[in-house]
Image (tube, grey):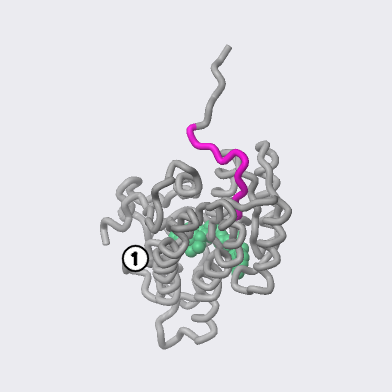
Amino acid sequence: SAAPVVPLVTLEGRVALITGAGSGLGRASAKRLATAGAFVGLLDLDADGLAETAEEIEAAGGRCATRTADVSDPESIRPAIEGLAEAAGRLDVVYANAGINGVWAPLADLEPDEWDQTLAVNLKGTFLTVKYALPWLKKRGGSVVVCASVNGTRVFSNTGATAYSCSKAGQLAFVKMVALELASHHIRVNAIIPGAIMTPIFNKTVERNIESEKPHVEYTDGRIPLTGGDPGDPRDVANAVLYLASDLSSHVTGAEIVVDGGESLLQ
Ligand code: NAD
């Protein structure tokens, strides 16, 4: 008979919380962590998206729970995180992934409330997610993974991405500060830096930015060394999230893993 398949990475017995789990990178990562044995708590604004993710996880034999919540609103995200953690009895991994492109526009056209919205979801949302998970993570240590972007580290030709880029650069500073602050609690804090990955956000037309209305292939063609132009697959990111979530990365904190097929090498 065949030898049992022993997974190289296991999250058996662990509880992971994922924001933005109703779509794209959050969904793919939730599925990946569940496949590795974690019980996954799924959070998103989008109830339908969450239900679809949960259905896919359960169909594959995984275990999960869902809560709708807005990561930018403390009154919404706090009870959602506490509810999931209390129901699961522990919390080991947090993947702060929820994000929006927001409005991409030249500064003169960008309205103050549009700036605020992008920073509120991407940066404040990361802060709130980690803050409210912290009491649970402190009980036995854990791993926080933050989803930033190559836009937070380099300037691409997508003029108008200023608010988005600032939110993503801010997340990287957050990761370093908090990694140091939480190290003594055995809580590791690391960033994923995805390049162009094929998810709904990538295909969303961004208001008032002519450049981004081009088909994606026009943007990435020739700009992703590993593929020649095809954007990455959400599973490429999910595997990096799994590494940072698991004990395989036991001595890694304050680090950044770029998952971009070499895209940023050309910048
Ligand atoms: P996506 O649009 O497919 O998924 C984002 C999810 O976040 C959605 O389900 C959405 O409902 C949820 N969300 C948005 N605002 C929320 C809020 N206030 N509260 C709770 N949930 C909220 O996009 P994606 O590509 O999966 O993006 C995930 C993360 O990856 C984002 O932080 C994004 O900036 C980052 N990223 C994506 C790419 C890419 O090319 N896809 C590249 C770099 C970084």
The residue furthest left is 266
At label 1, the amino acid type is: Thr
Which residue shows up at 50% across the image and 48% down it? 245
Magenta span contains residue 66: no
Residue under pointer 1: 153
Q: Where on the picture, by quarter, is residue 125?
A: bottom right
Instruction: Examine the rendering and report whether any part of residue 39 can be seen.
Output: yes
Residue 102, percent from left and from top? 51, 73
Residue 55, placed above or below residue 79? above
Q: Where on the picture, by quarter, is residue 220?
A: bottom left
267 horizontally vs 74: left or right: left
Residue 186, placed above or below residue 98? above
Residue 225, placed above or below residue 122? above
Residue 110, percent from left and from top? 46, 84
Magenta span contains residue 9: yes
Instruction: Examine the rendering and report whether any part of residue 24 can be seen.
Output: no
Query: Magenta stretch mostly in which secondary structure?
Result: loop
Which residue shows up at 68% across the image and 43% down it? 63
Quadrant where ligand 1 appears: bottom right
Which residue shows up at 63% across the image and 74% down it? 73
SS label for mark 1: loop
Which residue shows up at 53% across the image and 65% down it? 99
Which residues, given as a range, are shown in magenta?
Answer: 8-17
Residue 146, percent from left and from top? 48, 60
